[in-house]
Image (cartoon, rainbow, N blue to C red):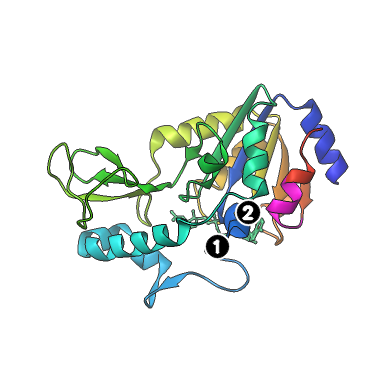
Amino acid sequence: MLEEVRQKLRDARRVFVLTGAGVSAESGVPTFRGGGHSAVWKGLPFSVISSAGMVERDLPAVWEWFDYRRGVLESLKPNPAHTTLARWQDRFTALTLATQNIDGLHAAAGSRGVLELHGSIWRARCTRCRHHEDLRQLDQFVRPPICGKCNGTMRPDVVLFGETLPVSVFEQAAEGARRCDVCFVIGTSALVYPAAGLADIARDAGAYLVEINPEQTPLSQLCDATLRGAAGELVPRLDLK
Ligand code: OAD
């Protein structure tokens, strides 16, 4: 199966990659689901602490949760799946890399123009004027941060439960999916829409669909190739020589 996928890659001009939490698992980032676990923080299920309702009810608690997660991420490094995908951007006519991850590890590995479907944990966004700040550059530690443009209250620039994806980012990803020859779906449970629907878009447009995941997902049966195993091991083995 690996050899067949390698051959498809040799012939491919346009490649689309959708990644999820599993691509960062070997860097030490906990996944949300899988292995029988689902994320919980201070007794609150992930779907509650990371929800639009929580921003309304208790924005400081949301900041506390995202500050905690950023603290965990600070020392983590990209793994061989991230670095291989970063190299792929110079190998094809077009490579579109869309991620559901907010951890910034694709960019840290050198990927350019990553489509962050669920936003970034490293950015804050003003709730009033939508001005963005990179939290790594922001030298204020008040929570919530105050917008430098309009004095509004800032929130993490991530997509929360009950919110929609940034339209233009999703549209760019959908375009990449529609136009690709080969589509990779790596390290995602493929349960969260509309992100998971990008694989359907690629498949409906005739792409060769490859899943890389140690576990079966709802997408598995639609795939042309399913590679069972860890992304950090399998993606480098697909690297073009
Ligand atoms: P999940 O936690 O739902 O799924 C992680 C997937 O990665 C599972 O299918 C695992 O089997 C797989 N996996 C684990 N280790 C792996 C490895 N080393 N290599 C490859 N795959 C591995 O994460 P997502 O699908 O990314 O949304 O979750 C989607 C969205 O659900 C997240 O972006 C988040 C959450 O709600 C928001 O926060 C908006």
Q: Is residue 150 above or below residue 48?
A: above
**Looking at this view, is 157 or 54 the one in front?**
157
Residue 189 picture location, percent across and down: 60, 57
Whether disc 2's CB lies below 8 Å from ligand 1 is answered yes
Q: Is residue 99 above or below residue 189?
A: above
Labels 2 & 1 near each other (Cβ < 8 A):
yes
At 65% from the left edge and 49% from the top edge, which residue is drawn? 186
Quarter of the image where one finds residue 29: bottom right
In the rendered structure, the answer to whether residue 67 lies left or right of residue 19 reads left
Q: Is the C-beta of the residue carrying label 1 under 8 Å from the nearest atom of ligand 1?
A: yes
Split into 4 quadrants, where in the image is the C terminus?
top right
Query: Hey, which residue is sitting farthest left in the picture?
Result: 151
Crowding at mark 2 (Cα within 10 Å: few <14, some 14-19, many 20+)? many
Regarding residue 224, the answer to whether it shows in the image is: no
Could you tell me the amino acid type at mark 1? Thr
Dot 1: what SS? Answer: loop
Which residue is label 2 attached to? 187
Residue 168 is one of the magenta-drawn residues: no
**Which is nearer the N-term, disc 2 or disc 1?**
1
User: Which one is in front, 72 or 63?
Assistant: 72
How far apart are the two marked residues, 2 and 1, measured between alpha carbons? 9 Å
Magenta stretch: helix, strand or loop mostly: helix
Secondary structure under badge 2? loop
Q: Amino acid at mark 2?
A: Gly
The residue stretch that appears in magenta: 228-235
Task: State the residue at coordinates (40%, 57%).
Answer: 70
Residue 12: x and y in percent read 75, 27
The percent position of residue 123, horizontal first and vertical second, equals 34, 45
Q: Where is ligand 1, by quadrant? A: bottom right
Provide the residue designation for mark 1: 31
